[in-house]
């Protein structure tokens, strides 16, 4: 599959954008007109630079408001078009995007539109240019890709074809199956963009909230499957208007964009395999054989299963005394120090926490790394690297476990570990014998980890964990806090063995206290017993207001003794049709706190109604 991206997706100058696209590995680019108009580079210089970088110049865009106009305006539009065709010749480009008219059209007549498009195609042919006509979702008279293609057929000119844009099609819920009936020689270009499902006018939705494939909720694999079945062989190019992307680091955004196309290519191949024999051609061959029948070849990645569970969580800190005290109060046991590294291991049942003091000078405690149990760390790492994940290497001795590591968008290090059926970890033997301590009778596992995401990398993180770690994104929620709404995105495995919560915190106020916090949650069998034991060890619980328990009683009509226990131990409670959820929080150390939870029955949530309470109490403690 030939990959492309529109320069409008990225921040920076045209030169910076082109360099970033080459670094990310794109085959070609679309030049957005404004990027060229504002560039000091001459068209000839852009052409030379693209050749030097190994980038094709695949599309010039956009040419707006051409069709359905009065004769006088048509004459001006043809003059404007010829100027652009001459410019494209200097650039060495041969395809231009013409959008359906949204502003100046006054004649709603397909015959008129076809006649005017025919004049444009004739003029384009004189200059060796192909015109890709696209139906904008908010077009005044043409807003449906099938309508746009009918016009192309009416004109029947070799220099006029259509552009299929996933956003304009999927935002209007148009059926994508008819794409297979389009003559592939008349599909001049394909653009893809994802988006969250939002209730708003389609123009605003398009201009501000598009995202890269895998970061939204559109059925892009199905869209691409129909495009492939149609016989299209040209570029598949990203056209994403997004306020965040156009403010973010250009090279990083380009890499994220390339990752999204790699993921889309794999997902499209999977859709074709899963839907073999259901296409317009009625083919019934097997998945691999079916893919080879189409002119466009779709690459796939090494197959991996979703993680089986958390292997460990790692917190980095300069001064570890508070962390050690906190873990001890929760009931964790100190297993010792690593024999060659300045790190500690603390465990409770199968929950393992590493405290890392290496290269942590003056560092406040923060979550630094997560380990996941996978079937094959080497294969999982190879897949992640093909998805442009940066490799994280750690020095090891000859007789030590070698972890396959990659870096997440927020710089959290992700280690892919060899899982074991009994939940143990082979690497723990590298730690010396721990101090004598009273073992907790409680078993525990890491239930979920909550990571704060920088605003400019939130969507990137969703795609990263979806594509590289096979986690499934759940519908996002917005949680109120005293400093603003916190967007929360759950990523998890089908069985809930791995739950990762990504939080987009409100923008930090200048000179204010840090409001972003992250936490590790541990699941135990008996939370009340765990809380009582922790209290006896002197644990500083997050103090829950009395008003919360009055509201809890009104909502759930709990037994008085049970409600009194919750109040006494600062426990929070939630219930749904599947079960119950009890949890409590510790005070925060640096940017880290811990949560202990108990899941009863089939409860699979996170106590979402209690999140505003937690945010408010933590906010108050920061501002005292």
Image (cartoon, rainbow, N blue to C red):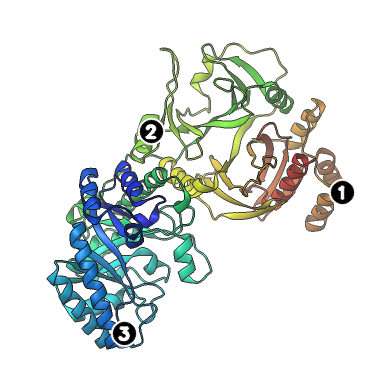
Q: CA distance from mark 3 to mark 2?
A: 56 Å
- Front one among 28 and 197: 28
| Residue assigned mark 2 | 381
Q: Earlier in the sequence, mark 1 or mark 3?
A: 3
Contact, CB < 8 Å: mark 3 with mark 2? no
Q: CA distance from mark 1 to mark 2?
A: 52 Å
Which circle, 1 or 2, is nearer the viewer? 2
Q: Which mark is residue 560?
A: 1
Contact, CB < 8 Å: mark 1 with mark 2? no
- Front one among 456 and 602: 456
Q: Residue 439 appears in which quarter of the rendering?
A: top right
- Front one among 427 and 200: 200
Q: Earlier in the sequence, mark 3 or mark 2?
A: 3
Q: Residues within 10 Å of mark 3 (few under 14, many from 20)?
A: many
Left or right, 460 with reference to 287:
right
Asked if residue 56 shows in the view, the reply is no
Q: Earlier in the sequence, mark 1 or mark 2?
A: 2
Quadrant in the picture for the C terminus: top right
Residue in the picture at 49% in, 20% down: 426
Q: Secondary structure at mark 1?
A: helix
Q: Residues within 10 Å of mark 1 (few under 14, many from 20)?
A: few
Q: Is residue 305 above or below residue 87?
A: above
- Front one among 431 and 278: 431
Left or right, 213 with reference to 45:
right
Q: Residues within 10 Å of mark 2 (few under 14, many from 20)?
A: many
| Residue assigned mark 3 | 69
Q: Is residue 352 above or below residue 528?
A: above
Which circle, 1 or 3, is nearer the viewer? 3
| Location of residue 99 in the rendering, given as x and y in whole percent from the top left corner | 32, 72
């Amino acid at each position: 599959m030939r990959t492309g991206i529109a320069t409008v997706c990225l921040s920076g100058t045209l030169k910076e954008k082109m360099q970033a696209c080459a670094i990310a590995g794109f085959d070609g680019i679309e030049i957005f007109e404004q990027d060229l108009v504002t560039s000091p580079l001459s068209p000839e210089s852009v052409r030379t630079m693209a050749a030097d970088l190994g980038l094709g110049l695949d599309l010039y865009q956009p040419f707006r408001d051409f069709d359905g106009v009065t004769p006088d305006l048509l004459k001006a539009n043809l003059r404007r078009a010829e100027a652009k065709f001459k410019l494209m010749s200097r650039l060495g480009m041969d395809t231009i995007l013409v959008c359906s008219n949204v502003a100046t059209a006054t004649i709603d007549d397909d015959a008129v539109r076809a006649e005017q498009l025919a004049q444009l195609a004739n003029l384009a042919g004189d200059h060796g240019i192909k015109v890709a006509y696209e139906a904008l979702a908010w077009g005044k008279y043409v807003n449906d890709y099938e309508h746009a293609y009918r016009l192309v057929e009416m004109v029947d000119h070799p220099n006029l074809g259509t552009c299929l844009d996933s956003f304009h099609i999927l935002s209007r819920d148009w059926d994508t199956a008819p794409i297979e009936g389009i003559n592939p020689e008349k599909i001049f270009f394909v653009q893809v963009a994802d988006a969250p499902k939002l209730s708003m006018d389609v123009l605003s939705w398009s201009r501000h909230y598009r995202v890269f494939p895998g970061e939204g909720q559109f059925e892009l694999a199905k869209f691409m499957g129909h495009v492939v079945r149609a016989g299209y062989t040209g570029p598949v190019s990203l056209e994403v208007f997004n306020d965040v992307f156009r403010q973010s680091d250009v090279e990083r955004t380009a890499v994220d964009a390339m990752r999204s196309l790699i993921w889309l290519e794999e997902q499209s191949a999977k859709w074709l395999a899963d839907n073999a024999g259901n296409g317009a051609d009625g083919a019934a061959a097997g998945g691999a054989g079916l893919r080879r029948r189409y002119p466009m070849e779709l690459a796939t990645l090494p197959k991996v299963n979703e993680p089986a569970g958390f292997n460990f969580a790692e917190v980095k800190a300069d001064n570890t005394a508070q962390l050690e005290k906190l873990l001890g109060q929760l009931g964790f046991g100190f297993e010792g120090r690593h024999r060659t590294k300045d790190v500690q291991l603390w465990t409770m049942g199968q929950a393992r926490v590493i405290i890392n003091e290496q290269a942590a000078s003056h560092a406040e405690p923060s979550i630094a790394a997560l380990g996941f149990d996978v079937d094959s760390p080497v294969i999982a790492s190879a897949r992640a690297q093909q998805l442009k994940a940066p490799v994280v290497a750690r020095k090891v001795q000859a007789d030590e476990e070698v972890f396959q590591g990659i870096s997440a968008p927020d710089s959290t290090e992700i280690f892919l570990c060899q899982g074991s059926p009994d939940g143990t970890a082979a690497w723990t033997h590298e730690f010396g014998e721990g101090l004598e301590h009273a073992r907790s009778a409680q078993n525990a596992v890491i239930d979920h980890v909550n990571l704060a995401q920088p605003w400019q990398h939130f969507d990137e993180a969703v795609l990263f964990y979806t594509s590289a770690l096979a986690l499934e994104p759940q519908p996002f929620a917005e949680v109120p806090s005293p400093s603003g709404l916190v967007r929360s995105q759950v990523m998890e495995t089908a069985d809930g063995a791995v739950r990762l919560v990504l939080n987009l915190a409100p923008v930090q106020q200048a000179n204010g206290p840090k409001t972003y916090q992250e936490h590790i949650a541990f699941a135990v069998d008996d939370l009340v017993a765990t809380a009582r034991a922790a209290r006896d060890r002197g644990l500083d619980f997050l103090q829950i207001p009395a008003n919360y328990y009055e509201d809890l009683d009104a909502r759930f009509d709990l037994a008085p003794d049970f409600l009194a226990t919750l109040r006494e131990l600062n426990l929070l409670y939630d219930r749904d049709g599947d079960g119950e959820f009890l949890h409590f929080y510790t005070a925060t150390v640096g940017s880290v706190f811990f949560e202990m939870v108990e899941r009863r029955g089939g409860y699979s949530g996170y106590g979402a109604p209690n999140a505003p309470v937690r945010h408010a109490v933590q906010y108050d403690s920061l501002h005292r």
